[in-house]
Amino acid sequence: MKVSSLGEDAVVAALTRGLPCGEDVRLGAGDDCAVIGGARDRMWQLLKTDCVVEGVHFLAAEKPARIGWKAMCRAVSDIAAMGGGPRHALITIAVACDVKMAWLRGIYAGLRAAARRFGVSIVGGETSRSPGPAFISIALTGEVERTRCVTRGGGKAGDVLFVTGRLGGSLAGKHLDFIPRIAEARWLTANFKIRAMMDISDGLAADLPRLARASGCGFEICEETIPRNRGCTVAQALSDGEDFELLFAVRPADASRLEAQWRRKFPKLPLTKIGALRRRNADNPVHSLAVQRTGLSALRNSPASAKRRSTKPKPRGHDHFA
């Protein structure tokens, strides 16, 4: 059986099932980061790896500093999704022998810029020859207060779903220049009980079902409320991916206060209520992999201009093996 017949989520689930974990592993594979620490420790350690591959995540003609920035910031964004802050990074890079040294220096200029911006210490790594495309892998540590650590799995039926920023259009350049939402996530966890959170890397159509499934919930959203970058369709906002915005769930009682305080704290960054988590039932189950890609439905309490309806199948978001 080829991985293309399974899809990324099924491949990852098969590979990570039954991995050995010690007593200090609070959370292993399956979330934005692994979480390490004692049950009563004040601080927990976050562990993350991420990679960018030429021809998949960037084109060879891109400015190398932008590629380096993206490589570091992808991992930083996952630290943000857990409510933490990044700390130390190891960089692995593999290139062909005929790559110019100036290109590598450009990659490291971008890595350094991102590290300085987000307080990351680059402490080592590895270099190797690649017989094919170049790739850069980041191993990143972070830390988060035990009481402020947020996973994908804490959402409850009725929780309100929010998205930061605007979605879609990443290929126009945003995927190389995005800003991880570290400051926003730290503010959120300091001021509100964030029930569940993740960053949107594979597109809302792929990532929202993952959050709902981890929380044991179904979900409903109103397509008309999805915040889009200029010129993007709803389909692009759902499926383009590499938005690196935060998707999170809060109690309904906190939603209005959060919106008001957000506008004062981050006046230049939109925060949009897009829907809610729902109780599992025959009409809104925790979808299987095949079903969760078929689309999203309109929110029951949506504005009058957004009529409730069942939608046709929607774009599925990014899948590395599809």
Image (cartoon, rainbow, N blue to C red):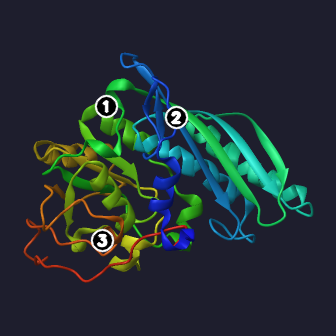
Residue at 43% from the left image edge and 47% from the top image edge: 30
> Which callout, 2 or 1, points to the residue nearer the camera?
2
Residue 291 has which mark?
3
Q: Nearer the viewer, residue 242 or 186?
A: 242
Q: Nearer the viewer, residue 279 or 63?
A: 279
Precedes in sequence: disc 2 or disc 1: 2
Precedes in sequence: disc 2 or disc 3: 2
The answer for how far apart the CA atoms under marks 2 and 1 are is: 33 Å
* Residue 168 % position (x, y): 42, 71
Q: Nearer the viewer, residue 40 or 280?
A: 280
In the image, what residue type sits under mark 1? Ala
- SS category of the residue bearing label 3: helix
Precedes in sequence: disc 1 or disc 3: 1
Residue at 39% from the left image edge and 17% from the top image edge: 42
Please rate how many residues cluster around mark 1, counting C-alpha atoms within 10 Å: few if below 14, some from 14 to 19, many from 20. few
Q: Is residue 272 above or below residue 317?
A: above
> Which callout, 1 or 3, points to the residue nearer the camera?
3
- SS category of the residue bearing label 1: helix
Q: Is residue 123 visible?
A: yes
